[in-house]
Image (cartoon, helix red, strand yellow):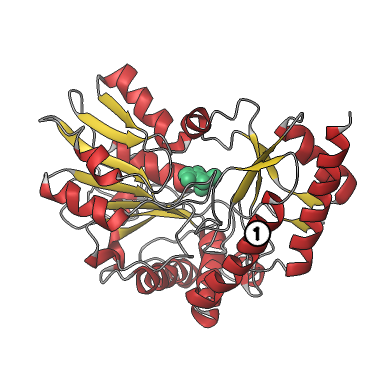
């Protein structure tokens, strides 16, 4: 099987990830209480080691401002529901994943939060001005994706953050497609909150992710419950990170995430990006040259994601043929990005090919050849 669905979850994982998961289960599968017996201490240490590795990778001085979550969706829900209150106004873009759009629309319906969606079409638009124009007295938060999971285009988050800061608005970034791939110095950046997955470019197992929160941001936890500290009190403690991580954490997953970050540190972000960019350029050039295929970006995108539509064919049909006849795994449909697909007018969805660090040039040639054959077959149907 040629796996080209890395934008959903990277696979295979680098050496060391599954060993770290197994070790956490076999050697110290205890519940990571703060204090307690030796095995609980070992489990807790493993979690804190991964938090420290994340802090080094993301340029965060105090690891306690990185909160572990199950995935990006969990982190985004915590950020959105932990800040917005009835009467607030929030601005999002038309590039947002449903992990942002749905909680925000939910709050619009259930909690009288007002929502404005801004569509700048492609990355050449003046996003800063377009978003700034929508700011009102009651605007509390700006939320934007960093990189699109449909087209691989990137928004200028540093510039957007400066604009939000100038207006005293909190800025939340969805870094699902960029964390572990692009370089961040979060403490230095004008970003208040940033949600990230562990299972994509950080090479960790599924069931991992997190939320970065600047120290002065007044965030409410999404879940209340046991935190391993202040157990004699019934009020939820608000110390970071534990007050925001109620319940037993995913220790094996977080151990695996630590090994994924070790791999990034050893290989280098730049080297990973260089290889993925090379594959992306090859893929974009190959696909856009095929008759009957329309690639959704006018140039090779900054992120390793190339999506296309095919004349006379439904995206899902193409992906099924790639899977069943060519043993090539891609993702088709609307990619949980209803707003973005509406903006692109891809009525029948699109096919997304997303290479990862472990793909080769030969595999990219194979997918281009397969798409060419499928397009030729559909033309004459
Ligand atoms: N935002 C974006 C831009 C994404 O691409 C994804 C995953 N497809 C998510 C959010 C949701 O991520 P997760 O699966 O980690 O919840």
Residue 248: percent from the left, percent from the top? 46, 51
Count of number-bearing discs: 1
Which quadrant would residue 224 be assigned to in this image? top left
Residue 207 in the figure: left or right of residue 214: right
The residue furthest bottom is 266
Which quadrant would residue 68 be assigned to in this image? bottom left
In the picture, which quadrant includes the C terminus?
Answer: top right
Residue 73: percent from the left, percent from the top? 45, 42
Q: Nearer the viewer, residue 179 or 271?
A: 271
| Residue at numbered disc 1 | 355
When the figure is inspected, residue 295 is found, relative to residue 215, above or below; the finding is above
The residue located at (31%, 41%) in the rendering is: 143
Q: Is any atom of residue 235 visible in this view?
A: no
Residue 216: percent from the left, percent from the top? 15, 54
Residue 87 in the figure: left or right of residue 304: left
Residue 95 in the figure: left or right of residue 112: right
When the figure is inspected, residue 358 is found, relative to residue 97, above or below; the finding is below
Q: Is any atom of residue 211 visible in this view?
A: yes
In the picture, which quadrant includes the N terminus?
Answer: bottom right
When the figure is inspected, residue 77 is found, relative to residue 47, above or below; the finding is above
Q: Would you say the beta carbon of the disc 1 residue lies within 8 angstroms of ligand 1?
A: no
Which quadrant would residue 201 be assigned to in this image? bottom right
The residue located at (80%, 38%) in the rendering is: 320
| Number of residues whose C-alpha sits closer than 10 Å to that of mark 1, classed few (under 14), some (14–19) or many (20 or more) | many
Residue 4: percent from the left, percent from the top? 70, 55
Indicate the secondary structure of the residue bearing disc 1.
Answer: loop
């Amino acid at each position: 099987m040629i796996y080209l669905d890395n934008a959903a979850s990277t696979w295979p994982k680098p050496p060391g990830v599954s060993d770290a998961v197994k070790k956490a289960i076999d050697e110290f599968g205890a519940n990571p209480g703060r204090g307690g017996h030796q095995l609980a201490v070992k489990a807790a240490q493993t979690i804190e080691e991964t938090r420290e590795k994340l802090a080094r990778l993301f340029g965060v001085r105090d690891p306690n401002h990185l909160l572990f979550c199950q995935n990006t969706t969990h982190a985004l829900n915590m950020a959105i529901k932990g800040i917005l209150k009835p009467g607030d106004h929030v601005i999002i873009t038309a590039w947002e994943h449903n992990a942002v759009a749905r909680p925000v629309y939910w709050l619009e319906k259930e909690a009288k939060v007002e929502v404005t969606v801004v569509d700048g079409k492609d990355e050449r638009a003046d996003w800063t001005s377009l978003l700034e124009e929508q700011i009102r007295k009651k605007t509390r938060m700006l939320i934007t994706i960093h990189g699109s999971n449909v087209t691989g285009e990137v928004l200028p988050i540093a510039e957007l953050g400066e604009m939000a800061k100038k207006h005293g608005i909190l800025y939340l970034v969805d870094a699902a497609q960029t964390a572990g791939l692009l370089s961040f110095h979060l403490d230095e950046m004008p970003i208040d909150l940033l949600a990230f997955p562990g299972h994509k470019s950080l090479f960790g197992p599924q069931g991992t992710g997190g939320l970065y929160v600047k120290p002065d941001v007044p965030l409410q936890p999404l879940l209340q419950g046991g935190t391993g500290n202040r157990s004699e009190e019934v009020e939820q403690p608000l110390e970071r990170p534990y007050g925001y991580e109620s319940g037993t954490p995913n220790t094996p997953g977080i151990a695996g995430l630590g090994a994924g970050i070790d791999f990034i540190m050893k290989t280098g972000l730049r080297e990973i990006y260089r290889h993925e960019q090379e594959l992306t350029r090859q893929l974009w050039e190959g696909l856009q040259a095929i008759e009957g295929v329309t690639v959704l970006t006018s140039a090779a995108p900054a992120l390793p994601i190339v999506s296309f539509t095919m004349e006379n064919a439904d995206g899902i049909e193409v992906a099924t043929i790639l899977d069943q006849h060519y043993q090539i795994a891609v993702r088709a449909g609307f990619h949980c990005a209803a707003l973005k697909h509406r903006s692109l007018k891809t009525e029948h969805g699109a096919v997304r090919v997303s290479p990862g660090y472990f793909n080769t040039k030969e595999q990219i040639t194979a997918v281009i050849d397969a798409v060419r054959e499928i397009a030729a077959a559909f033309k004459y149907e």
